[in-house]
Amino acid sequence: MNFNDPTLTRRQLLASTAASALAFSPALSHAQAAWPSKPLRLVVPFAPGGSSEIVARALAGEMGKTIGQSVFVDNKPGAAGNIAMQEVANSTDEHTLILGHIGTLAVNPFIFSKLSYDAAKDFTPITLISKVPSLYVVHPDLPVKNLKEFVAYAKANPGKLNYGSAGNGSAGHLAFEYLKMVSETFILHVPYRGTGPMLTDLMAGRLDAASVGAPALLQFIKAGKLRCIATGTSARLPQLPDVPTVAEQGFKGFEMTQWYGLMAPSKMAKANLDKLEKEAIAATRSKLVQEKLSQDTALAVGNTHAEFEAFIKLEQARWKPVIARAQIKPEGV
């Protein structure tokens, strides 16, 4: 455009000048391409010490190598994960992410009459990071060596046994209620605020049993501090070849795994979401993360946004009837 043309109006001149500034401004161009411009915060909605932290740190460490900024894990437990979910849903900072989980995405929508977040509308699924086998463990002093003996003992002593979980609606709560349902046993549930505190009491003998993701349990099983009586997987685990599955011990078709995925606030810019998806998938599928999670008996996945979204819907449909039958309610209800 000829800026010396006398026929140009003042408005045209201003518009042309502004357009030129936008097109040739190195600072603006750099800002648009620089995301992330500071460290990414990956919120874990549970206390330290559980499978969630192991999965989150494996992803964060690898993704931080290539995305342009470090990724740090921030544990924010409370209210079955709802506190952290609400905070991230309301976040306007494009550098805050959250670890999605079977509890916060597929369970809480059905056990809480009112949630401060909408699992479908407030978050964008990025990738399913990992599926984690659920293990059933007891304190070594309990006079049972396998699931069959545990069920028989529970039926002979109704109401005497208890089990702990990371909280109402947690994966461990679901896993044990599922087992109680198929085995027709009565075992008291003791909810905690996180896996770490619950495991402390279980190993101290203040609890009888629990179901927890394998990564958080293997070291204690190998050290003899806990006894694994069954795995929730469809086949035996290579790390625990002598431990039969629940299905092998009389409950055909039984399977229980936890899962974790990366989520972002739905308000995040699409270009940033696309970059995040690409980097998260690459990190999850990397040899280092696969080996790290495999060492902890977890399976690395790394699927697409669309695949993860469809998976969440299937899980919601699967657990809704289980929750209704077990009458799982939030604490205090």
Image: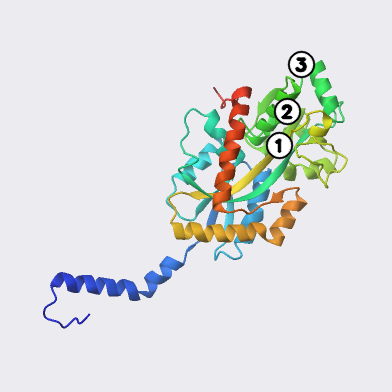
Type of residue at label 3? Pro
The residue that disc 1 covers is: 256
- The residue singled out by tag 3 in the image is 158
Where does residue 119 sit, x and y in percent of width and height?
50, 40
Q: Secondary structure at mark 1?
A: loop
Q: Are marks 2 and 1 in contact (CB under 8 Å)?
A: yes
Q: Is residue 142 visible?
A: no
Between the C-alphas of marks 3 and 2, the distance is: 15 Å
**Residue 232 figure quarter:** top right
For marks 2 and 1, give the CA distance: 9 Å
Image quadrant occupied by the N terminus:
bottom left
On the picture, is 332 further left or further right than 300?
A: left
- Label 2: which residue? 179
First in sequence: mark 3 vs mark 2: 3
User: Measured from the top left, where is residue 320 in percent x and y?
Assistant: 58, 30
**Residue 316 location (% of width, % of height):** 57, 36
Q: Decide: is 25 above or below 191.
A: below
